[in-house]
Amino acid sequence: MRRAIFPGSFDPLTNGHLDIIQRSAPLFDEMIVAVLNNPDKHPMFSVDERCEMITEALPSVDTARCRMIVESFSGLTADFARERHATAIVRGIRAVSDYEYELRMALMNRRLEPSIETVFLMADEEYSYVSSTLMKQVFELGGRVAGLIPDIVEERMKAKKK
Ligand code: PNS
């Protein structure tokens, strides 16, 4: 049984995240999309809202035979991965600029839990500039984000603005 976790803030989920989920699904039997509960970061969406949006958006991607689970977690990613008996941590890399941060995290996670490998996947170049932070910023300032985030996420963002 190959189980992976795909950890992140997902505030909010973007089509770049969904692209990574679709690419990684054939590699695993089960994948837990692990939403970090980090209230200190003042997220736009609560952790429950983020989990709901991911659950609603997942059927729009082909996740092959991989069983998908959405869960929130607090604390260390390495601890959560160990508790769930995952063998891999999936992370997406968009551009070289992501590499340094991701390398540091992967090496730290390996030190914390040597039996778990980080698996990096390259997002489609179409999403190489898409980040949750940029999506929130552009949306807040009235820019178009359609096609870069799932429709249900855009609807929820609009509802928040009202
Ligand atoms: O989507 P993000 O914000 O890039 O995800 C970052 C995340 C949640 C994967 C990272 O901040 C994380 O793992 N946080 C949990 C705390 C932790 O384990 N910190 C040490 C990482 S080496």
Image (spheres, helix red, strand yellow):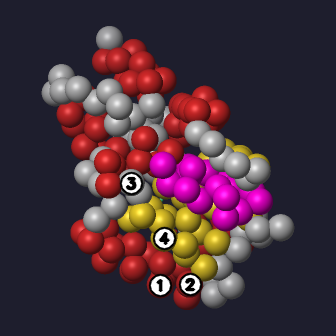
Q: Is residue 148 left or right of residue 117?
A: left
Mark 2 neighbour density, 10 Å: few (under 14) some (14–19) many (20 or more):
some
Q: Is residue 20 magenta?
A: yes
Q: x, y (%) of residue 32?
A: 67, 54
In the rendered image, which residue does mark 2 sit on? 110
> Do tag 1 and tag 2 residues touch (Cβ < 8 Å)?
yes
> Do tag 4 and tag 1 residues touch (Cβ < 8 Å)?
no
Q: x, y (%) of residue 25?
A: 64, 55
Could you say which disc has been placed on residue 120 in the image? 4
Quadrant in the picture for the C terminus: top left
> Do tag 3 and tag 4 residues touch (Cβ < 8 Å)?
no
Could you say which disc has been placed on residue 116 in the image? none
Q: Mark 2: which secondary structure?
A: helix
User: Which of marks 2 and 3 precedes in the sequence?
Assistant: 2
Q: x, y (%) of residue 156?
A: 43, 22
Find the magenta span and give its range.
19-35
Mark 3 → mark 1, Cα distance in angstroms: 25 Å
Q: Nearer the viewer, mark 4 or mark 1?
A: 4
Q: Mark 3: which secondary structure?
A: loop
Mark 3 → mark 4, Cα distance in angstroms: 13 Å
Tell me which amino acid carries mark 1: Leu
User: Which of marks 1 and 3 precedes in the sequence?
Assistant: 1
